[in-house]
């Protein structure tokens, strides 16, 4: 009698892709255009509470009011919190392994009341602190994306 | 208007990092059959089904209609809810509202996840905005690490304080035959584990788990038909406040005062509805969705168990251990088992078992009031209070 | 069931592509319209249910994108992933529970942003079915064939639905595809998947909608024209296409029976004045008419050919133009509900049907109408 073979049968989706074409919205598009063309950050201000949202969004949640007033904000700011990522993973947007370690932070740009997420040019957590001042470093070639900023550099090392 | 609602049956699979022996429907069915058996009823008696998971973890679209063989929803009403990590508690609340509405008497709530079948980190990254967050974001661990960094900065808490939470969760899990991780962990083990995303180390994090949980909710009109004592839902509330990764930090001043509005506001609503003023005294057991160790410090403060910055002292005092004033996560919690769609529902299931006196080795004596929370997405929070006594009137 | 009413509705125009608008923009527009319609501020909304789908949006936790725009700040909020009719039902239950007096339900979809067949292919079983490339259109073609063969329904019978509904769309400024068609033109449109031709199929659309529900007490304070929920039910059939008889509408029959029973309806053909059903494909209108009890098995074609379901007919069906004229997925069911509300209020503009006191709205979920949700709405409390 033949021996029963027990094997795990696995199905893999392989290189399956689901392409998407999202709309950045009118003000999101303006933000990205400013980054690309003028190396400048802009936000939108709530007419009711005065909060400046960066990056822009269409509605101030607490006030439930539409945001249409564009205001420029600085390309310098302060670290609100940070981490240094050391585990490797595949970036779902590119399908490629993300090179680690890399530092990234929640950054409050001067003039903004909401924060952005971006890379830091430092990977030693002992050298980074909450409250440190940082400045955007732009790429030479820009395409209209958050990655037009290569990273934020620590100003007072 | 409205019916009072109780949990009358609970079922859960053994949670494992990978269950190659079952497909998704079979995994769900395991939990469903266990719950039906626990409640002493059959599929025929169920009036409606509510199910939840995070779509991209299994890569199945329209999970409600897909699930009917496993969930038992054939020729019944079924709907799907999904809110990220809070899915399990969202599903519990949906089942509660189905019954409280008076339209359905016996509702089956199912939460499940088969994390082994997909790329969890990749899927979590797609939860966030493709323009502003995704290019930089690194998934759950890194998102939590951002919270940990700020918490340590504002309160002076240390990685070792957080390690106490990890050790407690692992120790509690040893009493839970269903939990995924059964490890005897020491503080040194946690401190020596490699960094995943500073300051969060491997020992601080929850695992990825395959698992399912099913809970049967019943109306006050039919509750006596069931063999187990009812575990009543006293109040539920949630706040899913934000849309972008950096939003949770916006309300926090760097100098002093930090704030977790989603959890604080949801908890306050629930406490007000039930009349709880001093949770540490009045809550007998808490099953909290703590996705990693630092949460076990910070969220105790947001839930009002202690003052701001006092989380470390509370945990080190033993108040949250078995035998303490308010044991937290006797089941081992999320750090010991994290099948995301099921996780929040398991908190509700565990609270029900505690109230019913059926929690075996993890039983806390004399549980009258139990607290369950859900966490997920952009630091969203769900809060449920359950109790042994039928509430005076429906107050949900 | 305690009385609950729809007190506010808002619908954005359905278009092939709303390029400048992200999900949050569409939702904010719909919610603002609903609030204006009800004469309410966002503070008067007690809780929110959002409706979206992670696959269509390309985001796990698709509801996250709209949290600010749906007005959920410091409110209880939940998310149903399924057609808007199911989401609205959940919103209704939350009021019936006594916990809330008003619920805002909003749904969004942008079909233009993804590759639709890839998304609907993901509905099918990854091990046994997906590799076949089966998706919403091809699976519906299987159902159309099963139904047509069983009852001797012809493609021409189905074409009549396309002709009617696209013509109706001329009177709906929000519809995407008002088209003047003849049966011949439908018949000569190219096959997508036999027997379905291009003009038998719904389009891909972008859009959002919102409704506001209120308990009886609140409803009467908010509006002079509350539209009452008389009955609502849903039911789900088997999953694998081979596990059920695709030509049989038993899940719809079951949901309709329960909804009618709640509403005290025993003879739908006589007691219902208007129907807005989910005609994702022309053949579906024929099948759902039968499931909703407006004709006998296989007689949907005859009913349509007789002119009974035309806007001036005995039982107008989809005077709005239906899903064939605009189909933002998930939103589409909510739109059926909204159309019924407008008709009952007498606010349906050029597409207004006379004397609508009771209407039926219908939504589907899952492949080939696996799951159905039926609403009965009435002008009298």
Image (cartoon, coloured by chain):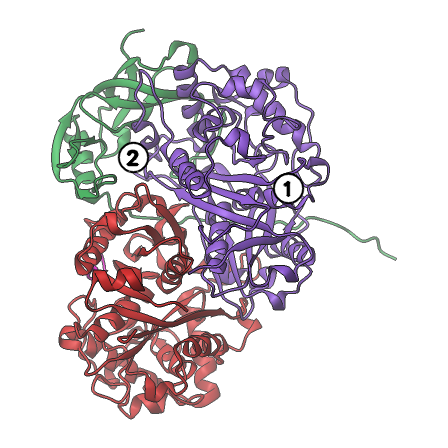
Query: Which numbered disc, 2 or 1, marks the residue closer to the eye?
Result: 1
Q: Quadrant of residue B155?
A: top left
Spatial CA distance of label 2 from label 1 is 43 Å
Instruction: Give left or right: position of B308 versus A70.
Output: right
The chain containing the residue under callout 2 comes to: B
Chain A drawing hue: green
Q: Residue B17: horizontal and vertical position, in percent?
A: 63, 39
* Label 2 with label 1: CB-CB less than 8 Å: no
Q: Which residues are magenta?
A: C11-17
Disc 2 is placed on an element classified as loop
Chain B drawing hue: purple
- Does residue B282 belong to the magenta stretch? no
Q: Quadrant of residue C350?
A: bottom left
User: With respect to residue B58, does C341 lie above or below?
Assistant: below
The chain containing the residue under callout 1 comes to: B
**Any part of residue B137 in sight:** yes
Disc 1 is placed on an element classified as helix
User: With respect to residue B277, does B211 lie above or below?
Assistant: below
- Viewer-nearest residue: C46 or A153: C46
User: Across the whole image, how many numbered discs are drawn on residues?
Assistant: 2
Q: Residue C80: horizontal and vertical position, in percent?
A: 41, 55
For label 1, count other residues whose C-alpha is less than 10 Å away and answer few (under 14), some (14-19) or many (20+). many
Q: Which residue is mark 2?
A: B132
Q: Residue B87: horizontal and vertical position, in percent?
A: 47, 46
Q: Which residue is mark 1?
A: B354
Numbered mark located on residue C49 in the image: none
In which quadrant of the rendered image does the C terminus of chain C lie?
A: bottom left
The letter of the red chain is C
The lab-note entry on whether marks 2 and 1 share a chain reads yes
- Viewer-nearest residue: A92 or B388: B388
Identify the residue at horizontal 31%, vertical 15% (top origin): B255
């Amino acid at each position: 009698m033949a021996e029963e073979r027990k094997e795990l049968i696995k199905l893999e989706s392989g290189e399956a892709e689901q392409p998407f074409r999202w709309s950045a919205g009118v003000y999101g598009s303006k933000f990205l255009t400013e980054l690309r063309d003028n190396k400048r950050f802009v936000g939108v201000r709530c007419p009711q509470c005065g909060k400046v949202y960066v990056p822009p969004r269409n509605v101030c949640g607490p006030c439930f009011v539409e945001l249409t007033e564009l205001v420029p904000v600085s390309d310098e700011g302060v670290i609100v919190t940070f981490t240094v990522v050391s585990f490797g993973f595949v970036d779902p947007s590119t399908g490629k392994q993300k090179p680690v370690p890399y530092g990234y932070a929640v950054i409050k740009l001067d003039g903004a009341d909401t924060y952005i997420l971006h890379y830091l040019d430092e990977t030693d957590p002992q050298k980074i602190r909450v409250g440190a001042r940082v400045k955007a470093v732009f790429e030479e070639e820009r395409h209209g994306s958050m990655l037009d900023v290569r990273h934020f550099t620590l100003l007072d090392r | 208007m409205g019916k009072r609602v109780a949990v009358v049956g609970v079922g859960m699979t053994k949670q494992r990092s990978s269950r190659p022996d079952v497909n998704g429907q079979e995994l769900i069915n395991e939990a469903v059959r266990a719950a039906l058996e626990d409640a002493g009823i059959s599929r025929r008696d169920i009036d409606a089904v509510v199910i939840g998971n995070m779509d991209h973890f299994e890569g199945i679209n329209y999970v409600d209609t897909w699930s009917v063989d496993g969930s038992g929803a054939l020729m019944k009403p079924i709907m799907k809810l999904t809110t990220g990590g809070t899915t399990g508690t969202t599903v519990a609340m949906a089942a509660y509202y189905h019954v409280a509405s008076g339209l359905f008497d016996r509702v089956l709530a199912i939460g499940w996840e088969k994390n082994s079948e997909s790329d969890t980190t990749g899927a979590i990254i797609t939860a966030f905005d493709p323009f502003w967050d995704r290019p930089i974001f690194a998934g759950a661990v890194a998102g939590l690490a951002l919270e940990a960094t700020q918490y340590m900065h504002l309160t002076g808490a240390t990685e070792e304080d957080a390690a106490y939470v990890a050790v407690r969760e692992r120790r509690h899990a040893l009493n839970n035959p269903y939990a995924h991780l059964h490890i005897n962990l020491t503080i040194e083990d946690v401190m020596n584990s490699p960094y995943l995303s500073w300051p969060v180390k491997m020992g601080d994090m929850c695992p990825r788990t395959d698992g399912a949980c099913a809970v049967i909710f019943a109306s006050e009109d039919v509750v006596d038909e069931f063999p187990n004592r009812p575990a009543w839902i006293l109040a539920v509330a949630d706040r899913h406040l934000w849309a972008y990764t950096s939003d949770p930090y916006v309300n926090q001043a760097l100098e002093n005062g930090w704030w977790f509005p989603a959890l604080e506001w949801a908890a306050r609503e629930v406490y007000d509805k039930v009349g709880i003023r001093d949770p540490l005294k009045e809550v007998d057991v808490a099953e909290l969705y703590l996705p990693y160790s630092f949460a076990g410090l910070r969220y105790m403060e947001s839930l009002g168990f202690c003052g701001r910055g006092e989380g470390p002292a509370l945990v080190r005092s033993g108040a949250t251990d078995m035998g303490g004033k308010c044991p937290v996560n006797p089941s081992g919690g999320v750090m010991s088992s994290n099948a995301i769609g099921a996780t929040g529902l398991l908190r509700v299931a565990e609270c029900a078992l505690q109230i019913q006196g059926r929690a075996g080795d993890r039983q806390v004596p004399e549980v009258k009031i139990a607290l369950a929370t859900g966490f997920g997405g952009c630091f969203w929070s769900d809060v449920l209070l359950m109790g042994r006594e039928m509430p005076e009137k429906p107050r949900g | 069931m305690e009385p609950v009413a729809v007190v506010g509705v808002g619908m954005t125009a359905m278009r092939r592509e709303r390029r400048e608008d992200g999900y949050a923009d569409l939702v904010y527009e719909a919610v603002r319209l609903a609030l204006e319609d009800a004469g309410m501020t966002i503070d008067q909304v007690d809780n929110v249910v959002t409706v979206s789908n992670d696959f269509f949006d390309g985001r796990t936790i698709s509801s996250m994108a709209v949290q600010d725009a749906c007005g959920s700040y410091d409110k209880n909020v939940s998310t149903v992933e399924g057609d808007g009719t199911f989401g609205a039902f959940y919103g209704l239950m939350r009021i019936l529970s006594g916990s809330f007096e008003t619920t805002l339900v909003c749904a969004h979809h942008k079909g233009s942003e993804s590759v639709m067949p890839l998304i609907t292919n993901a509905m099918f079983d990854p091990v046994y079915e997906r590799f076949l490339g089966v998706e919403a259109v091809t699976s519906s073609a299987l159902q159309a064939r099963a139904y047509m063969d069983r009852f001797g329904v012809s493609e021409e019978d189905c074409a009549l639905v396309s002709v009617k509904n696209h013509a109706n769309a001329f009177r709906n400024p929000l519809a995407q595809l008002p088209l003047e068609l003849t049966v011949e033109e439908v018949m000569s449109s190219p096959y997508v998947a036999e027997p379905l031709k291009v003009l038998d199929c719904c389009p891909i659309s972008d859009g959002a909608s919102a409704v506001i529900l209120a308990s009886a007490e609140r409803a009467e304070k908010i509006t002079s024209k509350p539209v009452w929920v008389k009955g609502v039910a849903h039911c789900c059939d088997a999953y694998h296409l081979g596990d059920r008889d695709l030509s049989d509408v038993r899940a719809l029959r079951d949901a309709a029976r329960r909804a009618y029973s709640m509403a005290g309806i025993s003879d739908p053909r006589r007691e219902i004045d208007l129907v807005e059903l989910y005609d994702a494909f022309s053949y579906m209108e024929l099948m759902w008419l039968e499931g909703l009890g407006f004709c006998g098995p296989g007689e949907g074609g005859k009913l349509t050919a007789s002119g009974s379901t035309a806007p001036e007919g005995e039982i107008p069906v989809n005077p709005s133009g239906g899903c064939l004229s605009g189909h933002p997925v998930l939103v589409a069911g909510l739109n059926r509900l909204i159309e019924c509300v407008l008709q009952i209020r007498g606010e349906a503009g050029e597409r207004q049907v006379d004397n609508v006191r009771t209407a039926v709205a219908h939504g589907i979920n899952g492949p080939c109408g696996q799951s159905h949700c039926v609403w009965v709405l009435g002008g009298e409390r």
